[in-house]
Image: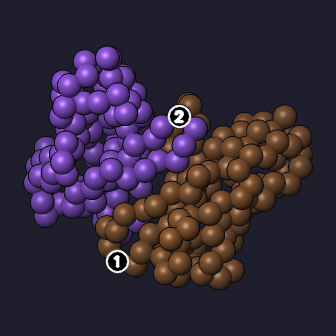
Amino acid sequence: DAGVIQSPRHEVTEMGQEVTLRCKPISGHNSLFWYRQTMMRGLELLIYFNNNVPIDDSGMPEDRFSAKMPNASFSTLKIQPSEPRDSAVYFCASRPQGANQPQHFGDGTRLSIL
Amino acid sequence: GENVEQHPSTLSVQEGDSAVIKCTYSDSASNYFPWYKQELGKRPQLIIDIRSNVGEKKDQRIAVTLNKTAKHFSLHITETQPEDSAVYFCAASGGGADGLTFGKGTHLIIQP
């Protein structure tokens, strides 16, 4: 099992640029979650999908953030335009079907907005 | 929404001693409580979890207890080893909300 795969691992870009983060969940998992980790705010849920459908996006900080899951094996988190305060580590996690199943995290994308 | 408080923020113990980390949650509908270990620059890794129909769960040197009435749960690590040094996060979910709400983390330091 390859685990949750995220790309890129690191991204450095200038403010105002569009940033796209990618995630491939574990095969067979039907729930996918995007989290953000910062020193100040810790680990925060941004959005999650069940069976490719967005269920709760109340954690998305602003309209500059958007997420899609076009199929069961791929999701993107996009920031447009990016700002320095978006700098953080973004984690994707997936989970099998069923209530209270464990979430498995990817290695994260470390994003730096200059 | 759910709020999870975690204490202490830093915990230093001698190698071989026990460590206890405590969390409280606010939403009585929460019914799933995982614990994650995160080493510097790495991803959070699940080490143990407990569901609300169970009061205690143990896996070798790690145990978790849950008190639903008081809305708190704890992580216990016995016979601590240097490789236990990391940041530990508690989390809660349930009641129709699948996403995890995390505590702020505990930096566990094992002194040789």
- The quadrant of the rendering that contains the C terminus of chain B is top left
The residue at the point 71 percent across, 58 percent down is A7
What shade has chain B been given?
A: purple
Q: Secondary structure at mark 1?
A: loop
- Looking at the picture, tell me which residue is in the foreground, A54 or B111: B111
Between the residue at mark 2 and the residue at mark 1, the CA separation in whole angstroms equals: 31 Å
Residue A88: x %, y % from top left: 66, 40
Q: Label 1 neighbourhood size at 10 Å, few (<14), some (14-19), many (20+)?
A: few
Question: Do dots 2 and 1 share one subunit?
Answer: no
Q: Label 2 neighbourhood size at 10 Å, few (<14), some (14-19), many (20+)?
A: few
- Looking at the picture, tell me which residue is in the foreground, A55 or A102: A102
Residue B17: x %, y % from top left: 18, 24
Residue to which mark 2 is pinned = B40
Q: Is residue B103 above or below residue A34?
A: above
Residue B97: x %, y % from top left: 39, 65
The residue at the point 37 percent across, 53 percent down is B46
Residue B96 — which label? none
Tag 1: amino acid:
Gly
The chain letter corresponding to brown is A
The residue at the point 69 percent across, 80 percent down is A70
Residue B1: x %, y % from top left: 39, 53
Residue A12 seen:
yes
Q: Chain of mark 2?
A: B
- Looking at the picture, tell me which residue is in the foreground, A81 or B17: B17
The residue at the point 60 percent across, 81 percent down is A72
Residue B20 seen:
no
Asked whether the beta carbons under mark 2 and mark 1 sit within 8 Å of each other, the answer is no
Tag 2: amino acid:
Leu
Q: Secondary structure at mark 2?
A: loop
The image quadrant that residue B85 belongs to is top left
Residue to which mark 1 is pinned = A98
Horizontally, is B6 left or right of A56 in the view?
left
